[in-house]
Image (cartoon, rainbow, N blue to C red):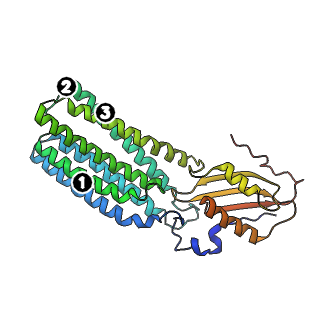
Amino acid sequence: MVHNHHHDDHGHDHHDHGHSHGHAHVHAPKNFGPAFAIGVALNLGFVIAEAVYGLLANSIALVADAGHNLGDVLGLAMAWTAMALARRAPSQTLTYGLRRGTILAALMNAVLLLVTVGAIGVEGVRRLFEPAAVAGVTVMAVAAAGIVVNGVTAWLFASGRKGDINLRGAFLHMASDALVSLGVVIAGAIILTTGWTWLDPLVSIVIAILILWGTWGLLRDSLAMALDAVPANIKLDEVRAFLERQPGVAGIHDLHIWPMSTTETALTCHCLLPGGHPGDEFLVRLAHELEARFAIGHATIQVEVNAHVACALEPDRVV
């Protein structure tokens, strides 16, 4: 006998608040709508100011930085859009809706940061060998404003970055830029007093290495999620042991755990119960416990009662 159970089909109180896609242990992503709105507005305003001042001061550096900061606006907009689309109802063709977009947005933010690192690194190395005119007071003033804009925006996402990799991508993007702006101000101040023009490209290279170090985890985790890897906060063996401990369970096979979005996790497995079907109450309780213990909100359990009828998917082969 087969019974497929989706946790939210039963209207459990703690998981039916307008189908918001957060769990009890994570603040629902909807809280970050205002953060995205403020972040996009702040950064767009900053891009316009940089472009105008850059053209007035005839500074290529400022105009280039305005272009780079436009990339940040795109990164924020991408994460925001993915979060909004994740709430759309599933359709006939997209049976999970567009939840996975949050994973793709995190991955794209990681890729955008790597492009930034490459650009900063190449320009830094080039300027080490061909010293150029260095940041003047105007550039430093604008960079100081950049520290505030990017720092405030990063702070807006700081609380959500641990529970949602999409928000972590947005946070890292803004924090990286605050770091770049800080580097410009510090290097500029030292150069004004010492005349060490080589310090500017050197600081750029150090910052590029720091951003690369910070981005690597985001890239690795978002790529793993895109490839349906078990979410980092869940241990497959622990879930298997928990399922095998259930009364009447003789064996578990074809166990799969994967991320539906950056905040939701799904599970499917075949469960051998030779004593007969345990009843819907057993499955409802199991789904409750899987969410409470492992934050797996979408569990589908296939019950098999005849040990002599070999399931085509047994034994489970986990490479």
Q: Are marks 1 and 2 in contact (CB under 8 Å)?
A: no
Q: Earlier in the sequence, mark 3 or mark 2?
A: 3
The kind of residue tagged 2 is Glu
Q: Which residue is mark 1?
A: 148
Under mark 3, the amino acid is Gly
Residue depicted at 54% across the width and 66% down the height: 24
318 horizontally vs 198: left or right: right
Query: Could you tell me residue 275's position as x and y percent?
Result: 87, 63
Left or right: 240 as drawn, with respect to 44: right
Badge 3: residue crowd in 10 Å (few <14, some 14–19, many ≥20):
many
Location of the N terminus by quadrant is: bottom right
Contact between labelled residues 3 and 1, with CB atoms less than 8 Å apart: no
Of residues 166 and 285, the one drawn nearer to the viewer in this rendering: 285
Which one is closest to the eye, mark 1 or mark 3? 1
Toward which corner of the image does residue 206 lie, by quadrant? top left
Which residue is more in the foreground, 302 or 96? 302
**Tag shown at residue 309:** none
Say which residue label 3 marks.
121
Mark 3, secondary structure of its residue = helix
Question: For mark 2, what is the residue?
Answer: 130
Quick one: 232 or 2, which is closer to the camera?
Answer: 232
Helix, strand or loop at mark 2: loop
Look at 35% across and 49% down and name the residue there: 173
Residue type at mark 1: give it: Val
Quadrant in which residue 280 is drawn = bottom right
- The extreme top residue here reads 129
Rounded to the nearest whole Å, what is the CA distance between mark 1 and mark 2?
31 Å
Is residue 198 at least partly visible in the picture? yes
Q: Which mark lies nearer to you, 1 or 2?
A: 1
Packing grade of label 1 (10 A; few <14, some 14-19, many >=20) is some
Distance CA(mark 3)–CA(mark 2): 14 Å
